Image (cartoon, rainbow, N blue to C red):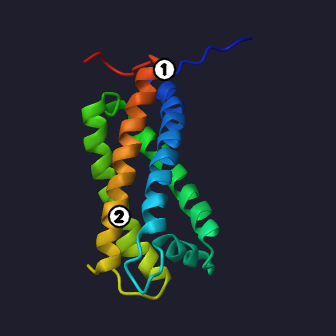
């Protein structure tokens, strides 16, 4: 006996959006990691080494690996949650910038300082530079996602 399974068109595109989002997250993560490698808001310490501090390291390479892993996850999540809205360049950039701000609040203002014994939700030189870095992430991730959707020629969802 055979059974037929039906997958909704929305469910079927989630893996595609996750892949496009993961790729977009890596592009945004590289751009952001470059920013964090050259930005030294505190005592001539690169922000990327602060990221390495999440695992008790001060090695910039470790910071890059940690950060790109986070960016991969953040990008895949962007694709899954917002991919159906981010298939054209302008909306993708706006959504990407907003998504970058969300990650700034969650990561840079809350999780990272809490894990490092620093005050949370504090505006200072580090968090202001980090906002710029997260905006770079969102801009690049959003634009890359839209470009991937266009390049693959598989816009999903209703025609606009």
Name the secondary structure under disc 2.
helix
Q: Position of residue 29 (x, y in %)?
A: 48, 53
Mark before the other along the chain sequence, 2 or 1: 2
Q: Is residue 1 above or below residue 95?
A: above
The image's mark for residue 117 is none
* Left or right of residue 134, residue 63 in this image: right
* SS at badge 1: helix
Instruction: Using the rendered view, name the quadrant where residue 86 is placed.
Output: top left
Which of the numbered marks, if any, corresponds to residue 152? 1
Quadrant of the image for the N terminus? top right
* Front-lying residue, 128 or 121: 128
Mark 1 surroundings: few (<14), some (14-19) or many (≥20) residues within 10 A? few
- On screen, 154 above or below 35? above
Q: Dot 2, how many residues are within 10 Å of its Cα: few (below 14), some (14-19), or many (20+)?
A: many
Which residue occupies 30% across, 79% down? 125
Can residue 65 be seen? Answer: yes
Q: Tell me if 51 is positioned left or right of 119 in this view.
A: right
Q: Alpha carbon of mark 2 to alpha carbon of mark 1: how far?
A: 30 Å
- Point out residue 41 in the picture as x, y percentages from the top left corner: 37, 78
Is 130 positioned to the left or the right of 151 in the image?
left
For residue 104, which numbered disc appears in the image?
2
- x%, y% of residue 151? 46, 21
Q: Position of residue 97 (x, y in %)?
A: 29, 49
Residue at 63% across, 66% down: 61
Q: Residue at x 26, y 79 (%)?
A: 123
Q: Examine the image and state in which quarter residue 109 appears.
A: bottom left
The mark tally for this picture is: 2
């Amino acid at each position: 006996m055979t059974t037929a399974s039906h997958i909704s068109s929305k469910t079927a595109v989630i893996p595609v959006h996750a892949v496009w989002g993961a790729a977009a997250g890596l592009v945004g993560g590289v751009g952001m990691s470059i920013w964090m490698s050259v930005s030294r808001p505190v005592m001539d310490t690169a922000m990327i080494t602060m990221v390495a501090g999440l695992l008790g390291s001060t090695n910039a390479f470790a910071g890059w690996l940690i950060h790109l892993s986070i960016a991969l996850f953040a990008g895949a999540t962007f694709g899954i949650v917002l991919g159906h809205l981010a298939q054209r360049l302008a909306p993708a950039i706006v959504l990407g910038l907003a998504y970058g701000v969300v990650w700034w609040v969650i990561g840079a203002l809350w999780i990272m300082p809490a894990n490092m014994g620093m005050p949370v939700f504090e505006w200072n030189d580090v968090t202001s530079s980090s906002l710029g870095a997260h905006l770079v992430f969102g801009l690049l991730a959003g634009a890359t996602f839209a470009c991937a959707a266009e390049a693959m020629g598989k816009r999903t969802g209703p025609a606009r």
